Image: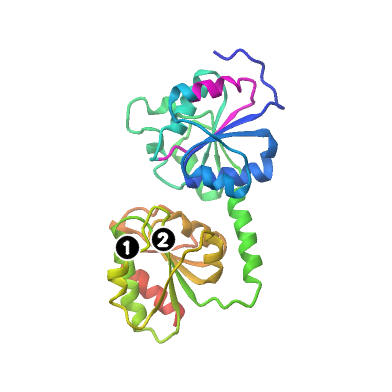
Amino acid sequence: MRTARNSRKAPIPVFVHDAGGGEVIGAYIKNVLRRRARVYGAGPALKIFKRIGVPITRISPARASIKKIVARHLDAPYALIAAPGWMTKLEIHALEEAKAAGLKTVVYMDSWMDDRRRFGYPHPDWKKRLPKEFWAGDRYALQNTRKEFKDIPARLVPNQYFKNERARLRGIRSGKRSHETILFASTIGEPSERLLKALLTSLDSCAAKVTLRIRFHPADRTGRYDAILRRSRKLRVQKSREADLVRDLARAAIVVGSETAALALASYCGLTTVNFVPNKKRPMLPFKEIVNAETPADAAAFVAEFVS
């Protein structure tokens, strides 16, 4: 039971684990909350917060550990929690403990679909995990959140990560660097392999002199596509070792991938972006500016025509 008096000046506890939420919430803290935030997390978020220079305390995702942290912040106006991911229960436990303590819960959504499943749907008790309020970083995420959670207030809190990265990209591209690279945003799973094969087939017969640059998923291995790449003898292929996504985007004339959030940033930054959506599913990225392709061949054909 909450006993302390709410204070607008009290530190705001923040809980985060996954990379997507880490980038979005980290940028929001650095630009808006600043020293008011007390960040607790684990997993990929630790490296992100270290990189951007925002203090974060490593914690265990266990409920007992999070309960003790929540007890230190009962006078906070709210607890800010990243959208629950698939790698950990850290965010779900933070939601449950904050709600049990009577602390207002706010979840910042960093995705554009499958939002209910993040909270345990279709389990009968999934609604008990929902926050008091949702934040969404762009109009597409806001529309989806309001559609999925009609009974919970949702408001637009601009995605500072996207805004910052777009400004950085424009600064980098203002130089004389040529933008002739096709950036392939790789993801874990078979759709990326199908897409790369189609790209090699289309681009090998393309007259334009372009370079295909592969940006690997952080959890991927750089030798994954070696057997596929040996089939191409004409196309110049690079394996990116760049930690900074924006620097890879700055080289690109066009970006192509399959259902990865990197495409959302590319589109937001104004780059022509192609998304292969496997199995004719609803696109994960509902951006009207993104070209959605039903087959790898369709995606590859669009890219080849664009660079020709």
Quadrant position of the N terminus in the picture: top right
| Residue located at (44% from left, 83% from top) | 308
Residue 62 point in image, percent of width and height: 43, 27
Camera-side residue of 217 and 123: 217
Residue 48 point in image, percent of width and height: 54, 47
Looking at the image, is 81 positioned above or below residue 99?
Answer: below
* Residue 95 numbered tag: none
Distance in Å between CA atoms under marks 1 and 2: 9 Å
**Callout 1 touching callout 2 (CB < 8 Å):** yes
Q: Which residues are magenta?
A: 66-85
| Residue located at (43% from left, 54% from top) | 218
Q: Secondary structure at mark 1?
A: loop
| Residue located at (64% from left, 15% from top) | 4
| Residue located at (34% from left, 78% from top) | 202
- Apparent side of residue 97 relative to residue 233 in the rendered image (left or right): right
Q: Is residue 145 visible?
A: yes
Question: Of marks 1 and 2, which one's residue comes earlier in the chain?
Answer: 2
Q: Which residue is mark 1?
A: 224
Residue 57 point in image, percent of width and height: 56, 34
Q: Which residue is mark 2?
A: 216
